[in-house]
């Protein structure tokens, strides 16, 4: 679960509501009536419904998958590069001992379809250039699909303030028409709609759509990194590279902090043996 996203959103909502309800001159200082002032049905219809209508109109097929997008965004560490490095090193060891055909059993155990496909391509003795071409093309197409989804939420982020401005114009027009004294009672409500719609548009854009787009972009980068590691590892296994050198090569795809963790994790068993030998001596 992506806990940090949930914490961030909840804090943003809390501080916004606190800022609305807080009044230092009142006793008690929290005035719940202020919250009611920010609830306006016409403003909700204009901004929220209008924004989602535009998103659906621009991306009719992708909009149906919004629940799935949210589920992906909320997953944390779905793609762990260290795990892929460990698996590839294990595959390299098996291939050096028993040949590439011995990897077929490991391929069937994979839950990642891309990883399984990559293993089967070398098990079937395909040309290395063809293997890399197929896998690279898969990565490009996957990234393009992910970016299209991110673009949908960015579109929503752009549309929300625009509908806030539309609501503001509607409220101002109605307010100005009432200035002739014919219906002065509508002046306050019309002005309220004018301002609250701008508020709704800003909140929808910067608290809802922008964080979703940013988190989906992060998930895309994590998946693409793991797939690049798979491609490099699979090509090295096909060429018969030493598993030790393979690990060193694959670690270069990761940040230094991730590399240190992977190296420590990979070195623990040997260090334990050396420690025991040292104690015996």
Image (cartoon, rainbow, N blue to C red):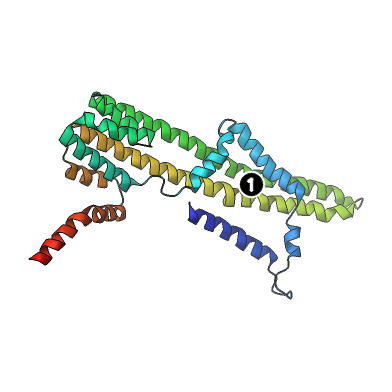
Res. 52 image quadrant? top right
Judge whether 239 appears above or below 246 on screen.
above
In depth, the one of 160 and 56 nearer the eye is 56
Res. 32 image quadrant? bottom right
In depth, the one of 46 and 7 nearer the eye is 7
What residue is at 24 percent from the left and 56 percent from the top? 264
Residue position marked by numbered label 1 in the rendering: 161
What residue is at 50 percent from the left and 48 percent from the top? 74
Res. 33 image quadrant? bottom right
Indicate the quadrant containing the C terminus: top left, top right, bottom left or bottom right: bottom left
Res 166 seen here: no
* Residue density around tag 1, few if under 14, some if 14–19, many if 20 or more, within 10 Å: many
Res 29 seen here: yes
276 lies left or right of 33: left
Judge whether 122 appears above or below 93 on screen.
above
Q: Residue 152 in the image: x percent, y percent?
A: 55, 38
Q: Residue 238 in the image: x percent, y percent?
A: 21, 31
Judge whether 99 appears above or below 177 on screen.
above
Q: Residue 160 in the image: x percent, y percent?
A: 63, 45
> For the view shown, which residue lies furthest in the right direction?
182
């Amino acid at each position: 679960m992506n806990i940090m996203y949930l914490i961030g959103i909840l804090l943003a909502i809390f501080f916004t509501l606190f800022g609305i309800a807080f009044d230092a001159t009142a006793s008690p200082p929290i005035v719940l009536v202020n919250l009611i002032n920010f609830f306006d049905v016409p403003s909700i219809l204009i901004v929220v419904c209008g924004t989602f209508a535009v998103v659906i109109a621009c991306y009719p097929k992708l909009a149906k998958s919004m629940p799935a997008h949210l589920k992906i965004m909320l997953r944390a560490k779905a793609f762990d590069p260290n795990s892929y490095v460990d698996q590839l090193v294990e595959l390299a060891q098996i291939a050096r001992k028993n040949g590439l055909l011995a990897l077929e059993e490991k391929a069937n155990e994979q839950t990642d379809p891309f990883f399984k496909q990559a293993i089967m391509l070398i098990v079937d003795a395909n040309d290395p250039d063809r293997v890399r071409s197929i896998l690279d093309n898969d990565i490009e197409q996957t990234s393009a699909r992910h970016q299209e989804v991110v673009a949908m939420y960015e579109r929503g982020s752009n549309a929300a303030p625009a509908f806030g401005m539309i609501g503001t114009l509607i409220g101002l027009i109605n307010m100005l028409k009432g200035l002739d004294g014919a219906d002065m009672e509508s002046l306050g409500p019309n002005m309220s709609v004018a301002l609250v719609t701008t508020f709704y548009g800003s909140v929808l854009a910067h608290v809802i759509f922008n964080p979703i787009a940013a988190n989906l972009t992060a998930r895309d980068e994590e998946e693409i990194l793991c797939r690049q590691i798979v491609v490099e590892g699979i090509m090295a296994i096909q060429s018969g590279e030493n598993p030790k050198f393979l690990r060193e090569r694959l670690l270069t795809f990761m940040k230094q902090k991730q590399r240190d963790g992977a190296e420590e994790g990979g070195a623990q068993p040997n260090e334990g043996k050396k420690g025991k030998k040292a104690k015996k001596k």
